[in-house]
Image (tube, rainbow, N blue to C red):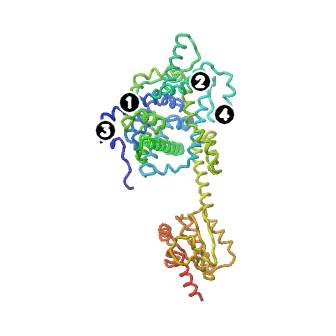
Amino acid sequence: MKHIDFQPALFQTLKNYSKEKFLSDLMAGIIVGIVALPLAIAFGIASGVSPEKGLVTAIIAGFLISFLGGSTVQIGGPTGAFIVIVYGIIQQFGLEGLAIATVMAGIILVLMGAFKLGTVIRFIPYPIIVGFTSGIALTIFTTQIKDLFGLSIAEVPADFLSKWAVYFRHFNTTNWLSLAIGVGSILLILLTPKFSKKIPGSLVAIVAMTLVSYFLRNHFGVTGIETIGDRFEINAAMPVPAPLPFDMGTINQLLPAAFTIAVLGAIESLLSATVADGVTGHKHNSNTELIAQGTANIIVPFFGGIPATGAIARTMTNINNGGKTPVAGLIHAAVLLLILLFLGPLTKHIPMACLAGVLVIVSYNMSEWRTFRSLMKNSRSDVAVLLATFFLTVIFDLTIAIEVGLLLAMVLFMKRVSEATKISVTKHVVDLSHESEITHEDEKLSVPTGVEVYEIDGPFFFGIANKFDECMKTIGDKPLIRVIRMRKVPFMDTTGLHNLESLYRLSSKEKIKVILSGVNPEVRQVLVKSGFARVIGEENICPHIHAALDRAREMLQQEP
């Protein structure tokens, strides 16, 4: 394997580090750490794990992603995008299954970075990204209805439609105090930016609603407000790493889920880094970023953490508050560690309805409903991919949505390419007036009797192989020589080559000669490697149409 593209941005930026940069990074890191606190807790709980595991993920993954990453300002940690997939894995395979799947996803990410696939991830169609992001947003919103309304439901079903069926049957059990706290949290988050751009609305909502809940419970004897402490036991300490049992049976079962975590993590982290580049003017190293994300996801599960990736909201908070280098990300991780160790027990007083309100806002911001609406005006194929990915994410799960979405996008793309590729036939005159293949005084070339000229305009791959066959069958009279112009064929795959070989074989049986014209170097290399150039004869692979027709006349003279 060639040189691995691993160049952590931290070591590059420390070469010219200064006191001014450190002070900027210190302020940004503290603010981002405070912003990350409620989100890490909320994402942890929504994913089906205890709140401190969300914090542990933000601390360890946040540190490693900043320490090893390829972006100067990327902030890593648990994100809303993983809630759906993580919750599903825990339901099916338990916490141990999640840890194994996360380690496998980390290994996949490291391999993607090592094999320089960072740029390839960017080619995933935009409708797929919007489709599953909007689907995840709706699913997150759905999971928070029970806590937001304080509904009395013993067990909430796993799938989307069953959830809503149960919700509608239990809306008469709404706890109006919980709903008031949830709605109050949403309003505080929405109103805070109007008064302060620095203080995160989610933190204001959590502090305010926790104080309200605490006084109502302890001084007014109000019951019925469920808090984190009622559901979880908080362990305010960094966990000791524990071994994980790996066996082939479990690995085979968890491979699809691990692939989904890896793809989702790669997409979100590189999307976040690209957005950050647009603001800062710097350019991130996508392969280094993938290796850092992978390393974080390999290590975090041994401490009981959940999948992590680059977080767009926290990254933008870092930039907006003056973060200059990855040191800000390291400070953010240190701030969270101090909060876990010294303020961890206080988190048990946070109302569940308040966290539900925080996640409702997260899901709204993730929904990208304006982008979704604008994409609905695009071509039918884009709309089909968008809707298929969205509904599969919501009704089934993210793994199926990404797999089917990618497959559908590829099939529709190939259909478009095959429709754009044209095959034409000329029997008498080749018009060169609009061509620039070769400079020649004649604008029209006469085609000798017994010769037919076929032109393939576009890539010659399996998508158009049948079209070429059909075109051949529509020709009435059999010529003596077939000239196939390939000047507009940028590449040829194995199926296209097989199709060409079949044409040559069938033509030979019918005593018809074949000449190729205008073959570019890449396609010629394919012909030489496969041995087809030797079969057809190097003299019958001509550089341009003039040489091809001269060769045809020469062959006609040799005919008995």
Point out the tag, 2 or 4, that comes first from the N-terminus.
4
Residue sticking out furthest to the bottom: 560
Q: CA distance from mark 2 to mark 4?
A: 24 Å
* Residue ID at (68%, 22%): 172
In the picture of the structure, the residue carrying the numbered disc 2 is 183
Q: State which quarter of the image contains the N terminus.
A: bottom left
**Label 3 close to label 2 by CB (< 8 Å):** no
Q: CA distance from mark 3 to mark 2?
A: 45 Å
Viewer-side residue, 105 vs 462? 462
Q: Is residue 357 above or below residue 501?
A: above
Callout 1: helix, strand or loop?
Answer: helix
* Position of residue 525 measured from the top left corner of the image (x, y, whole percent): 47, 68
Can residue 249 be seen here? The reply is no
* Position of residue 119 measured from the top left corner of the image (x, y, whole percent): 46, 50
In the picture of the structure, the residue carrying the numbered disc 4 is 162
| Circle 4: residue type | Ser
Q: State which quarter of the image contains the C terminus.
A: bottom right
Q: CA distance from mark 1 to mark 4?
A: 46 Å
Q: Is residue 110 above or below residue 307?
A: below
Q: CA distance from mark 1 to mark 2?
A: 31 Å
Callout 2: helix, strand or loop?
Answer: helix
